[in-house]
Image (cartoon, helix red, strand yellow):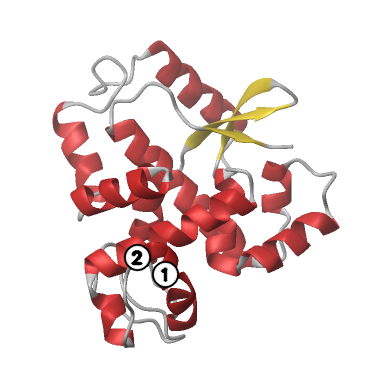
Amino acid sequence: MGKSSASATHGGQLKTYSLFPVASKRQSLLVSTFSSKRLPGLGIGWPAGNLRKLWETAYPRAYAAEMDAAAARFGISAHLLAGLMREESFFNAAIRSSAGALGLGQLMPATARQMAASAGVVVNSDADLLVPSVNIALSAAYLAKLQKHFSGNLLMMAGAYNAGENALSRWRSQHAAQPLDLWVELLDVSETRNYIKRVLSSMFAYHLLSNTADFPRIDLK
């Protein structure tokens, strides 16, 4: 499942685009197949039967209750939070990166301490970031901060979680005339470019598995 499609608004029109490069004929076939709901195993348009089991294996919902509660509390997308944690840690609460990021949301200790009050948690030591409930609250609080900063734009929120809001805002201002989907493809920082694609792809996969018809839209202006 290395390729995914997403819906976005650009110039007031709904635009379907691929989060990963695919041949145009193949992309058109994929989009038309989903639109006509003829893909085997999709039932009425959503993964069903054995196909759903494969999707759920690839996109697990670990800590679902905690993530849903945190998303509701901070007013953010539960699917974005799940997609982000899938890509950051694959739900390994004890994971530590070589750069010092910790836990489910791979938070840096300095960022975690800055967000502790907003998240309503206490961070006495780095070990606290390995506690799932603490890390989820901190990650959700940070996403809420990014949501406010970027007026709810999911693409920019995902990118800023990786690179920081100041860096992402600076990069965007340097090429403000470009639509966001093109801008992402031209980002010089490959880590952030690929991170945005992976997180949004996972977010849309979780949304698909939720059987919710109203897919998130991303303003590409």
In the rendered image, residue 52, in percent from the top left (x then y), is placed at 20, 34
At 48% from the left edge and 46% from the top edge, which residue is drawn?
200
Secondary structure beneath dot 1 equals helix
Number of numbered discs:
2
Q: Quadrant of residue 112?
A: bottom left
172 is higher (above) or lower (below) than 20:
below
Please name the residue that numbered disc 2 is placed on.
120
Q: Residues within 10 Å of mark 2 (few under 14, many from 20)?
A: few
Residues 15 and 94: in front is 94
State the separation of the CA atoms marked 1 and 2: 5 Å
Answer yes or no: is residue 61 visible: no
Q: Quadrant of residue 165?
A: bottom right
Secondary structure beneath dot 2 equals loop
Callout 1 touching callout 2 (CB < 8 Å): yes
Please name the residue that numbered disc 1 is placed on.
117
108 is higher (above) or lower (below) than 153:
below
In the rendered image, residue 152, in percent from the top left (x then y), is placed at 57, 43
Q: Is residue 141 left or right of residue 16?
A: left
At 32% from the left edge and 70% from the top edge, which residue is drawn?
121
Q: Amino acid at mark 1?
A: Ala
Q: Amino acid at mark 2?
A: Gly
Q: Is residue 2 left or right of residue 190?
A: left
Q: Residues within 10 Å of mark 1 (few under 14, many from 20)?
A: few
At 82% from the left edge and 49% from the top edge, which residue is drawn?
176
Q: Is residue 36 left or right of residue 195?
A: left
Q: Quadrant of residue 93?
A: bottom left
In the rendered image, residue 43, in percent from the top left (x then y), is placed at 23, 17
